[in-house]
Image (cartoon, rainbow, N blue to C red):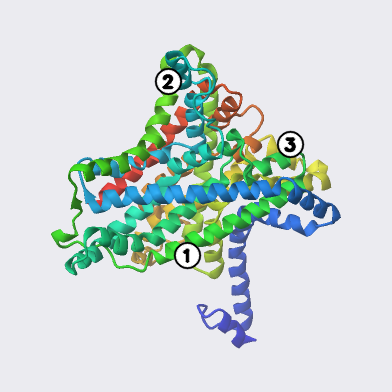
Amino acid sequence: MHTILIYLTPDLPSLPPSRLARALIRRRLRDLPLLLLAGALLLPILAVLGSWLSWNAASGQILREMGATVLPDYALTSIVLCIAVAAGAALVGTAAAATVTLFDFPGRRTFEWALLLPLAMPAYVVAYAYTDFLQFGGPLQTWIRSHFGLEGRVFPEVRNLPGAVGVFVFSLYPYVYLLVRTALAERAAQLMEAARLLGAPLARRIRSVALPLARPAITAGVALALMETLADFGVASYFGIQTFSTGIYKAWLAMDNRIAAAQLATLLLAVVAVLLALEMRAQQRLRFAAGRSRGGADAQPARLHGRTRVAAWAVCGLPILFGFVLPLAFMLRPLAADWSVLPWDRFLNWAFNSLRLGAISAVLAVLVALLLAYRLRRAPSGVARGVVQLAGLGYAVPGTVLVVGLLLPVGWLQSTWPQSGVGYWMTATIVGIVWAYLVRFVSVALQSVQSGYARIPGSLDDSARMLGTGGAALLARVHWPLLKRSAAAAALLVFVDVMKELPATLVLRPFNSDTLAVVAYQLARDERLGEAALPSLALVLVGLVPVILLSRTLRAGSR
């Protein structure tokens, strides 16, 4: 037994069996907070998966009824939407990234950061803006009918599946653009130069060298875009598209059928898991190549002239135009027309609710990320690594799945123990919505904090321990001063994501606590698109902050 204990704990010193057993117990007790935290973050997923354990004849009947009615429509619409968005985002993002990386033309430096601007525009805000301007009663069709004497509809209806594809493509292509641009900038230059020396023309160098190198980045970017597409609720609901997200919402709130909602959530979670595995595999393939080449004028971007320069402007300018400039102009129109119709008196209350939830969630997410990253650095056990990896998966879980996963155990506990008041705390206070935010956005803070820890050498920890500083003092006096910028960036990213989150906020928000995202959705749903412009613009302004910081980081990296 003594030999087995030593084998299982090789990092512990040779101790008598009794003391060694006590050391093992203390180590397991130190892992207990990590396991409890992992349980809290994984509860929604475990609840959705655990709903299948209560399978009975009624569950089977519900699944058969969905299979005969709505489930084929949900599956077909989601598949067609994903295929079209994948093709469009890959084409637009790869073309823009290749243009600004492999070619030189006037305005290239401006396009490098401007192509990131659609990241600041939530997809549902883009949908509201285009619908307001292009619908039958919108200013464009009204002007055409009045000036040309036409009657009836001039353009096809915007709120349909092709319209949703266009919204998603021009809102999500920056995921592909960012990864492909990074991959080409760091890996393509050296091999492109070698191919040129071997006599390959420019077109063949792009087709045979640059694009194959960018395939893992394209795959990873497309997977991220598809995860956002499947998780979307605002665009699909507003355009009347039958996707899994809208189906989960209808099954829970409209039909009051928790089993059907849990089954649909499981199917959506399985698809997201496949996309996440695809994205992680693509990210691993991105790490195979050497670093950036820095020598030789032959590795510089090719200079464009004439028609090719105009084509480069079009490739880079059209995504910015359709993804940011036009939606922003459409939303500014109601403000320029008549400021008095806008709900200024209620705007401050909506903004306060959004800021309050964003600030609380950001602080808590950064604290959790700091504790996880510190524990992984100080005691990199298998439990710590597993908890950190599981916490990093939360961002891939759609908001509708989080809602079902949190409310299922709450409903069961409330029916089993009515005096507990858990239903009140989860739905009438901010506890439930902040919990959902932490499950989804702790991974965002964790990535930023871990990147900050990667820049702190381990020798600082050794020196601090030699001077008698350890435990919480090490984190407070040594790590924290060096992690302030990373923690601030993490808090900012979580804050912005919370401000824009719609499906979880729509269901779990307390009474009379509407946020900017919820109000924009409700006003647009009621066809009050002019009033929806004000909260939508506020969300865009908030989203611009991390985009500006990201563009500054990319410019500093290129220098």
Q: Extreme left residue here? A: 297
Task: Say which amino acid is labelled 3.
Answer: Ala
| Labels 1 & 3 near each other (Cβ < 8 A) | no
Q: Is residue 432 left or right of residue 495?
A: right
Task: Say which amino acid is labelled 2.
Answer: Arg
Q: Extreme right residue here? A: 57
- Which residue matches tag 3? 254
Residue at screen point 22% across, 65% down: 200
Task: Quarter of the image for the N terminus: give it.
Answer: bottom right
For label 2, the crowd category at 10 Å Cα-Cα, with few meaning under 14, some 14 to 19 and many 20 or more, is some
- Which residue matches tag 2? 333
| Labels 2 & 1 near each other (Cβ < 8 A) | no
Give the mark, 2 or 3, whose residue is nearer the N terminus. 3
Residue at screen point 53% across, 42% down: 361
Could you say whether the residue bearing mark 3 is in a helix, strand or loop? Answer: helix
Residue at screen point 56% across, 48% down: 80
Give the mark, 1 or 3, whose residue is nearer the N terminus. 3
Viewer-proximal residue among 92 and 414: 92
Residue at screen point 60% across, 78% down: 19
Inter-mark Cα distance, 1 to 3: 38 Å
Inter-mark Cα distance, 2 to 1: 45 Å
Give the mark, 2 or 1, whose residue is nearer the N terminus. 1
User: Which of the labelled discs sits on residue 281, or is there none?
Assistant: 1
* Residue 486 visible in the picture: no
| Quarter holding residue 336 | top left
For label 1, the crowd category at 10 Å Cα-Cα, with few meaning under 14, some 14 to 19 and many 20 or more, is some
| Quarter holding residue 187 | bottom left
Viewer-proximal residue among 22 and 528: 528
**Relative image position of residue 347 (x, y in whole percent):** 52, 22
Compared to residue 166, the image places residue 93 above or below, namely below
**Relative image position of residue 277 (x, y in whole percent):** 53, 62
Could you say whether the residue bearing mark 1 is in a helix, strand or loop? Answer: helix
